Image (spheres, rainbow, N blue to C red):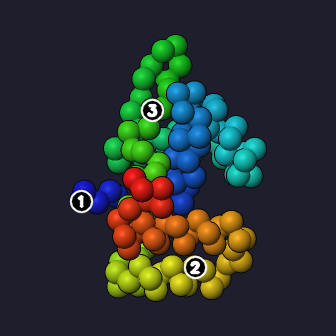
Amino acid sequence: MYERCALSECELVTMRCVWNLKERATAFNVINMLAEDYGMQYKETTVYTFLKKLREKGFVETRRQGVTYYIPLVDEESYKKEMAKKLVNFWFNGDAAGALKAVAEGEHLTRKQAREVRATLDVCVTGKNPDGE
């Protein structure tokens, strides 16, 4: 598996904005989302730097159509799974059960969330979805 460069916290939040904005990700839209959704007030030049770093690291490409659009090259779900695996490997020596236990002990799960976790664990153990797929 190809291991990506680590993103700084600021780059990660910027990338999250790009994922959320999809095809409408311009620097202006990212600046607004950072402020409105995350309470992060950055100068334009700072956000341009974050976006440039994301491009250099292979997370986005740019497309110029009057304005510059930032197009994700990395799928958000794939990135989440990759980062979760890194976390489990680093902090829990590859022990996924230990990681899950640590998370579960630190959080209050609703009954629905607990059912979803059980269903996911069943799939992991049996390799089959509950509906037979």
In this rendered view, identify the residue nearer to me: 87 or 106: 106
Query: Picture quarter containing residue 63?
Result: top left
Task: Look at mark 1 in the image and give the residue it sits on.
Answer: 1
Q: Helix, strand or loop at disc 1?
A: loop
Amino acid carrying mark 3 in the image:
Ile
Residue found 57% across the figure and 79% down from its top: 103
Which amino acid, by three-letter code, is at mark 2? Val
Residue 125 placed where, x, y %? 38, 73
The disc at residue 71 is: 3
- Judge whether 59 appears above or below 78 on screen: above
As measured in the structure, the alpha-carbon distance from the residue carrying label 3 to the one carrying label 1 is: 23 Å
The mark that comes first in sequence, 2 or 1, is 1
| Viewport quadrant of the N terminus | bottom left
Tell me whether the residue at label 2 lies in contact with that at label 3, contact meaning CB atoms closer than 8 angstroms. Answer: no
Which residue is located at x 34 percent, y 44 percent?
58
Q: Residue reaching furthest left?
A: 1
User: In the structure shown, which secondary structural element does the residue marked by tag 3 occupy?
Assistant: strand
Q: Residues within 10 Å of mark 3 (few under 14, many from 20)?
A: many
> Residue at left 51%, top 79%?
100
| Residue 41 seen by the camera | no
Is residue 107 shown left or right of residue 59? Answer: right
| Residue for badge 2 | 103
Instruction: Please rate how many residues cluster around mark 2, counting C-alpha atoms within 10 Å: few if below 14, some from 14 to 19, many from 20.
Output: few
- Indicate the quadrant where residue 26 lies: top right
The answer to whether residue 2 is seen in the rendering is yes
Circles 2, 1 touching at the beta carbon (< 8 Å): no
Q: Nearer the viewer, residue 82 or 126?
A: 126
